Amino acid sequence: MFTQSAECYEDLFTEEHEEAQLDNLRDKGILRYRTKTIKSGDMLECEIYPVWRTSRGGSRAAKENPSRKAQKNLNDKNIKKWVVRLTNTNFTDKDIWATFTYDNEHLPANEAEAKKDIQNYIRRLKDYIRKNGLPALKYIYVTEYHADGDGKTVRVHHHMIMNFRDRDIAESIWTKGGRTQTRRLQPDDYGLEGLARYITKTPQEKKCPAASQAAKSSKRFTASLNLDKPIETISDTKISRGRAEKMASNPNSAREVFQKLYDGYLFNDMAVRYSDFVSGVYLYVRMRRAPDIKSFGKLIDATQTKKPTVLRDAALCKTKIEA
């Protein structure tokens, strides 16, 4: 029997919760629900999506030939998601992030010069590390382009997350003038997701077309080759079809379900998404490791007495249970 999963069609599940969509949960074309678990450092994500009996994805045909804009948005979303996971996997509150800017004298003339500047910085930093017997450098950097005060001049700065922990040395090795600032990483309930999304933000085209064009032609991010990868596992038995339907209909039940499934993790929130093109529901859950607790049996979960906060926007019904 041929089956097709919604893993390839995540972008189809974008609609907010409506009562009429609950009928699609019971579509006979849904064979089961698949659970992808992604562990990135102290963060855990679950993506739960239907596997259908046929390639048509249930009672409605899948969307074909997505527009260039839709494909671009999906690519952008996937890049940001990957950077978030790499960052949470490899960096902690002992590490730093830095912003390197230029003075007028050293402003690079083009993208190639900007790339050469940051690569030379990394080379000098590695030389220092090697001479002082420090751990191998791990990093993620993004080069950002923005408009100067005249709205026409393209200025450049670099954001870098790294495991080099001496902030004074990190700042002194940058030799292109400008403002150099380093900060200690500060994870929150979502790890370092906020920072990762900030440094990979989409350029504002209307403010400076030239800066936007430079950003489009450059690589969105660059990472060292020695970064650990997030750990992904797939299960077709972890979440039954009935349980997926219940959580979609009653998102308040999700916290208890997932904290039992993932011992030692605390529930952050769950997004519930439906589609106009395929049947079933897509559930996206975020969790964090419980500090200094080895088993769920010892977990004192203060969130049990708190009511969930339901967040809505134009494309997404998200149920967030505050911890």
Image: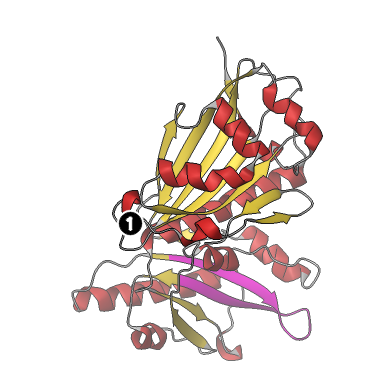
Is 300 on the left-hand or right-hand side of 207? left
x 32%, y 55%: residue: 298
x 44%, y 30%: residue: 235
Image location of residue 139, percent across then percent down: 40, 66
Which quarter of the image is occupied by the N terminus?
top right
Q: Is residue 76 magenta?
A: no
Circle 1 packing at 10 Å, graded few (<14), some (14-19), many (20+), is few
Task: Say how the picture is coloured.
Answer: secondary structure
Q: Nearer the viewer, residue 124 or 263?
A: 263
In the figure, residue 65 lies in which quadrant?
A: top right
Looking at the rendering, the stretch of residues picked out in magenta corresponds to 140-160
Is 209 on the left-hand or right-hand side of 185? right
From the image, tell me which residue sits under label 1.
226
On screen, residue 70 above or below 167 = above
x 34%, y 77%: residue: 124
Is 215 on the left-hand or right-hand side of 160? right
Q: Outermost residue, top direction?
A: 1
Q: Nearer the viewer, residue 87 or 174?
A: 87
Q: Outermost residue, front direction?
A: 305
Observer able to see residue 309: yes
Secondary element type, mark 1: loop
The image shows a total of numbered marks equal to: 1
Q: Is residue 154 magenta?
A: yes
Q: Main secondary structure of the magenta part?
A: strand
Observer able to see residue 76: no
Q: Nearer the viewer, residue 139 or 291?
A: 291
Q: Nearer the viewer, residue 311 or 108?
A: 311
Image location of residue 140, percent across then percent down: 45, 64
Q: Amino acid at mark 1?
A: Asn
Image location of residue 322, percent across then percent down: 57, 61
Image location of residue 261, percent across then percent down: 42, 41
